[in-house]
């Protein structure tokens, strides 16, 4: 414990000294740092901060030092995060490299792969994207068709991937491809790494109903992938993918989880839009008020359930069955909140752009539309319910 | 009232359905949007619809109309709702034209209605201000007498097709306080009148609307519609009729969204099976079917009640609005969900229906507003 | 038309003259007349009224005269019903004989069967019950197990039937039995008629969650059924059953359909139970008020949909797809109404018997419980939705 | 607060679960009902529960109690809720005992609490009158001072276990008007006091309650609980704690009802398949699972908030009541539906849970009441 407190003191001092003042306070740039070859910092000090943190291993605190990480224990990493929050410092680097492919390579990669890929991730030099879903595949991920033909020392890739977030900004992709078309669906799949600058790789962004989006479609036309870039074993990609996918679902749920700080907002927003609701006291539209209560109550119930799961984890218990509900409950709750916000705003919720709408009203429209995708991406609500019925409740197929 | 179609009505429905499919596919809406078309609909197509007699359906034969009812107009709107046609039926025929037909003097009607029926003139009703929400008695504008004239000031929002209307019918408070039914007057203001500022608004459903600012706009005594201070009840009647029209459009839209979804359920494969075999989706599809069948009945009933002047017309209008609004939103939300990822892309049509559903639900009073109205009319 | 008006006048005069005054007005007995060997009239004049009506064919107005019916046209029967209502006369006779087995025999019975069974039905001498469902069969009606063993001129019946309404009051039963255990499920079933006094037939009533019920379980132990009592053909009982079942579902829907006269009731009941709600004006509990509106609105929507179907039938059109929704919508709507009535009554809705509750409050509790069965009996809501998905929407199995 | 069980708590839960399964199966409730048992629960079993220390959980060690919290008592109630045990925890421990522990004088506590803890004495709280609905400030009774004494008149309904209580704690209006929190007093009335008429009521859930009539009932100054006119706030706190206990019981009931239903889904065959293979039923089962998991979290939170005196206790109580009430009704309605015909028969247990669910939902305020309370506490 004494060691940890020493660590806390040193870390705090280092952070406070090293983080440029331009990145702190009111005027700090809002744009997050994703790194990569195409990255243009919103402010030059973002690069300074990134380099200093990378140098000390603070972009990937728990990774081994030899691969560019900080080699910190879990407790130390927690303290680092606490001190970052306390000082209100921006994260030096975000991205799929740190949260998805990095941990995957640590678990399944060869030493060569770790040495090649992890340090550039830690330094923010290479940005990664994910190539899982395919046009037409939908929830049936294992039915993927992108073909990798064995040509001796390399594979020839043909096919396309959809929902590849920020593929137009990324340098490398980790992708699932079919290496054995004869095998049973999940058994002929391989997990591959590929440089996006490889000839034959192209990207086009996807327009959503809510407008522009980070999603892309990524095409492979006779793109060469080297055999050394296979992760784990050929035709065993499903094992790697499952580990990674579980990780993604947890992240998605966390994103919808807290509802913190939003408690007053619904009622406040109602006061803004309901005639005669400026004063304190009960909102004049009693049924709208009741719907606000329902969303608030369910948000609180969900937050308490997430807390229950975290408390159990902290106490060293196995994750309980309650964790299987996070994705479906979190996303459907967010949709209900968005629908309610639309009903609260009334005609002012109908703006798309320009004249007659406040900018937060225009945001509202877009985020309502965007929220409809929450119950589709990262495993549809239908799939989630299938999984609960089968794995948790033991109902037969 | 009989809830069936006559042979004549069947014919109108069939003609309109064929026209919508051939001349007005959803692709047209997409083109108008992507091309940032200044009008936002097709004047040529509008003229064609007028030539087919649809624009004139509810107007008197003396003005070139067919002197038919909402029951007939609803069939046209249902067919056009299937393909999201943005032509100005609600604004020009039911709101503006409806107010003129109900309360206009012989001269006013003669001046405007033949042009409306022929498809040459467009009208709009500027009835809601920034604070109105769904209360027609909150006008957002004032009218003050000066000699023989009236001077209008105030602001109106989301005036349907206000950006292209040749004249606006403007509600304004001439006496009393906002919120009271008494003391509201209606004025006919030509689009080029001094002090009238009209700015187009871009809505999520790609329908056309405008914000309107009135700054000392002067109108003559001959431009007052009906009795001074007496427009409150008229406004409710006119908007009620337009609401029935909107419900018919919603009925067509939800039916088409469901047809698209069913098609998807029958063709899309997942895990080696057509997804329409999954029982959970089947049951949800059955629920949607139920919603639409109920919606169809209430739309038919509300249109007929309007044509027959039934005593429970207002209840039926509120019933139709709640049923259609909730059903359209439900059907399209489910449609996007069942389409999955592609349903979220702009490339597929289903999203257009979802946007329209929400906008339609929040037009002329949302479900909560109309349930409250139903209870009030029922005395509880 | 002139003929019909003559008929109306004559009928009205006859009805007014023949119906005993004891059966009309405030003090008339409430008990309905089901007839049968065990029937004990609530008032002797019920028997007088039944006999007079049967004599004139008015218990089964549209059946042929030769079988005890009135031989009336549809239009005449409608006028008879109108005049009965106008004079507020009680129906002379009700029951499965008139509504179910009678029409079935008219369609599928032999002349001998019609002659044997229809006249006693018309005269109220024989009361019928239905033996379809079996313990353990549930929605899978065709999986029935009651065995009819061919013994030359008769069958030997073994097995049991459940949900046989009023079997303890009935004289005859029409039942589905398995005559060919080797055939595919629906192909080995026969539709049989059986006297309940046959040795080997016994009955025990079923206690429901709502208390005593008309339902019984009916047991067959080596009960002899004569071959002449097979309706239509051996092993073709499914055809007969389907016709009859369709008829039953329509009846069930009609029973929930009208919602007429109940419009004021929900709000009135709320005024009775909500403190401060005695006066006119908005109900003080706005969310309860909103739920009342929702049930009223849906009731009206349903009534209009039933009207649409009736209007189409009157105009000679085929029944539209909307008729497939009646059972599921009508029953679920009734359940929502019952749940709402419970919420309106609050603590006073919790009575089972005795002290502290009004008798209409006790009825409320029982009918709420009973309503839970509406979505199960006569084809569950799940089966109804399966049918809509398959037959109306064309979704594949 | 931490939302996990300590090892001690795990042990309590396990002991209670075993006890409920072995000593208190649902069959017992059926027997008590069918035998028209005059007590309506088992005094012997109650004594056993007292000997196990459960009755004394929330009481001070000085009175023989364990000085533990609602978190622990909730575990016992959850276990007993699984088998619908009708023993008088709510009435004697949480309502009557709760009021005495919170406000009783040293003499009053000494007189009653040791007997309560040992399982010998039973208490009840008569807090609602015929017009109260869910408002604790409408008492249905009046208290008028006469010399050193108070005279009580009025009527109380559905006093839980009032038919066997050795003493009733009676709320009555001593000043002000019905509906006001100020002016309510609590009185301790022994069951044999003149003017007290107690009649058992038979409820749909086969739980025990009584109607109480007070006709000039005289109580001494030493039978007043706490301050005259000041019992309004206490009443709310006591009923809130009992509500948490009721929620724990509901949690156990819904879990058991779901377990029964799942068992049925896994064993019942239709159309040649186990019905648990049907996707529509699977998804509905998943929804029920979600409801129960959320309910479990809020019950744990509300119990801990009560033990820790958290500032948002009242919100959490209302949250728990709404979540548990709605979930229990939903789970049991679905249970009966999934059981099908047999679920409607008295022979199966699932119907007992449905009846209890509805009664519990309408006890201590229904969902609408508690949503309204949440909004009020949130200032909107």
Image (spheres, coloured by chain):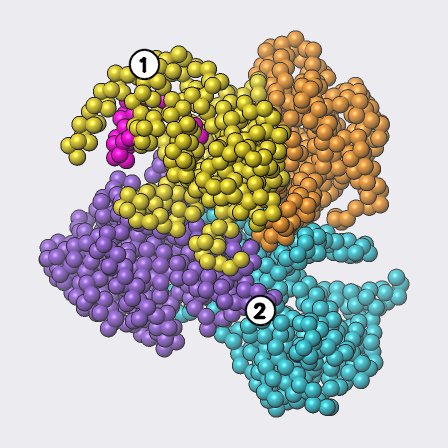
Chain colours: A cyan, B purple, C yellow, D orange
- Counting from the top left corner in percent of width and height, residue C154 is at 55, 32
Q: D34 or C348: nearer the eye? A: D34
Q: Which residues are magenta?
A: C71-96
Q: Which image quadrant for residue D312?
A: top right
Subunit of mark 2?
Answer: A
- Counting from the top left corner in percent of width and height, residue B93 is at 23, 59
Tell me the quadrant of the picture where the N terminus of chain A can be found.
bottom right
Furthest residue in direction right, as rendered: A2
Label of residue A138 in the image: 2
Label of residue C20 in the image: 1
Q: Which image quadrant for residue A11?
A: bottom right
- Counting from the top left corner in percent of width and height, residue C302 is at 39, 43
Q: Which image quadrant for residue A19?
A: bottom right
Residue C82 forms part of the magenta stretch: yes
- Counting from the top left corner in percent of width and height, residue C299 is at 40, 40
* Relative horizontal placement of residue C247, taking residue B122 as reference (left or right): right
Same chain letter for marks 2 and 1: no
Subunit of mark 1?
Answer: C
Identify the residue shown where x is 55% and y is 74%.
A135
Q: B356 or B157: nearer the eye? A: B356
């Amino acid at each position: 414990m004494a060691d940890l407190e020493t660590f806390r003191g040193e870390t705090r001092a280092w952070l406070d000294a090293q983080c440029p003042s331009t990145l702190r306070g009111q005027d700090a740039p809002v744009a997050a740092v994703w790194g990569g070859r195409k990255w243009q910092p919103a402010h030059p000090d973002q690069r300074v901060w990134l380099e200093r943190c990378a140098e000390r291993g603070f972009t990937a605190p728990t990774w081994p030092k030899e691969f560019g990480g900080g080699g910190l224990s879990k407790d130390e990493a927690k303290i680092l995060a606490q001190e970052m929050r306390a000082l209100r410092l921006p994260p030096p680097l975000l991205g799929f490299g740190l949260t998805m492919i990095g941990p995957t390579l640590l678990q399944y990669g060869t030493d060569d792969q770790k040495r090649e890929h992890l340090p550039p991730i830690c330094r923010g030099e290479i940005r990664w994207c994910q190539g899982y879903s395919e046009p037409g595949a939908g929830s049936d991920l294992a039915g993927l068709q992108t073909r990798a033909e064995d040509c001796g020392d390399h594979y020839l890739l043909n096919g396309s991937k959809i929902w590849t977030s920020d593929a137009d900004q990324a340098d490398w992709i980790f992708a699932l491809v079919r290496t054995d078309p004869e095998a049973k669906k999940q058994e002929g799949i391989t997990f591959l790494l590929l440089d996006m600058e490889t000839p034959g790789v192209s990207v086009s962004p996807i327009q959503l109903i809510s407008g522009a989006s980070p999603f892309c479609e990524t095409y492979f036309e006779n793109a060469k992938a080297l055999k050394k870039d296979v992760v784990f074993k050929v035709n065993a990609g499903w094992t790697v993918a499952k580990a990674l996918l579980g990780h993604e679902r947890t992240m998605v749920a966390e994103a919808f989880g807290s509802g913190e700080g939003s408690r007053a907002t619904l009622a406040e927003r109602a006061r803004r839009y309901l005639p005669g609701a400026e004063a304190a006291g009960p909102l004049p539209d009693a049924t709208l008020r009741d719907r606000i209560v329902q969303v608030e109550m369910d948000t609180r119930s969900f937050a308490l359930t997430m807390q229950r799961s975290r408390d159990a984890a902290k106490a060293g218990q196995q994750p309980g069955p309650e964790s299987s509900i996070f994705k479906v409950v979190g996303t459907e709750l967010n949709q209900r909140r968005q629908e309610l916000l639309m009903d609260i705003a009334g005609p002012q919720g109908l703006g798309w752009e320009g004249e007659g709408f406040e900018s937060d009203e225009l945001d509202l429209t877009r985020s309502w539309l965007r929220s409809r995708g929450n119950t589709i991406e990262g495993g549809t609500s239908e799939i989630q319910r299938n999984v609960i019925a089968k794995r948790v409740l033991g109902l037969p197929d | 009232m009989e809830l069936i179609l006559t042979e004549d009505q069947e014919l109108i429905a069939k003609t309109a359905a064929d026209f919508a499919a051939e001349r007005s596919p959803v692709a047209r809406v997409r083109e108008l949007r992507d091309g940032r078309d200044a009008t936002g609909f097709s004047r040529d197509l509008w003229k064609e619809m007028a030539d087919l007699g649809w624009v004139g359906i509810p107007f008197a034969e003396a003005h070139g109309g067919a002197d038919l009812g909402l029951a007939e107009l609803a069939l046209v709107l249902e067919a056009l709702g299937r393909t999201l046609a943005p032509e100005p039926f609600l604004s020009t025929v039911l709101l503006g034209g409806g107010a003129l037909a109900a309360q206009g003097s012989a001269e006013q009607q003669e001046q405007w209605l033949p042009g409306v029926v022929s498809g040459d003139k467009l009208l709009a009703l500027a009835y809601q201000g920034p604070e109105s929400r769904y209360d027609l008695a909150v006008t957002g504008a004032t009218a003050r007498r000066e000699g023989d004239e009236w001077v209008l000031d105030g602001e109106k929002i989301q005036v349907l097709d206000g950006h292209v209307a040749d004249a606006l019918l403007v509600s304004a408070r001439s006496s009393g306080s906002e919120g009271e039914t008494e003391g509201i007057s209606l004025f006919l203001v030509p689009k080029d009148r001094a002090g009238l500022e009209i700015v187009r608004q871009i809505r999520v459903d790609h329908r056309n609307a405008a914000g309107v600012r009135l700054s000392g706009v002067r109108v003559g005594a001959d431009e007052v519609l009906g009795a001074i201070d007496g427009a409150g009840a008229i406004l409710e009647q006119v908007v009620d009729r337009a609401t029935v029209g909107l419900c018919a459009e919603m009925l067509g839209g939800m039916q088409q969204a469901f047809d698209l979804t069913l098609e998807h359920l029958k063709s899309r494969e997942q895990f080696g099976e057509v997804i329409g075999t999954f029982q959970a989706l089947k049951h949800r599809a059955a629920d949607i079917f139920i919603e639409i069948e109920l919606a169809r009945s209430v739309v038919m009933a509300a249109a007929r009640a309007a044509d027959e002047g039934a005593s429970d017309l207002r209840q039926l209008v509120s019933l139709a609005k709640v049923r259609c609004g909730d059903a359209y939103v439900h059907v399209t939300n489910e449609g996007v969900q069942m389409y999955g990822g592609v349903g979220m892309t702009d490339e597929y049509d289903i999203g257009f229906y979802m946007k329209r559903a929400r906008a339609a639900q929040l037009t002329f009073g949302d479900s909560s507003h109309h349930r409250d109205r139903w209870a009030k009319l029922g005395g509880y």
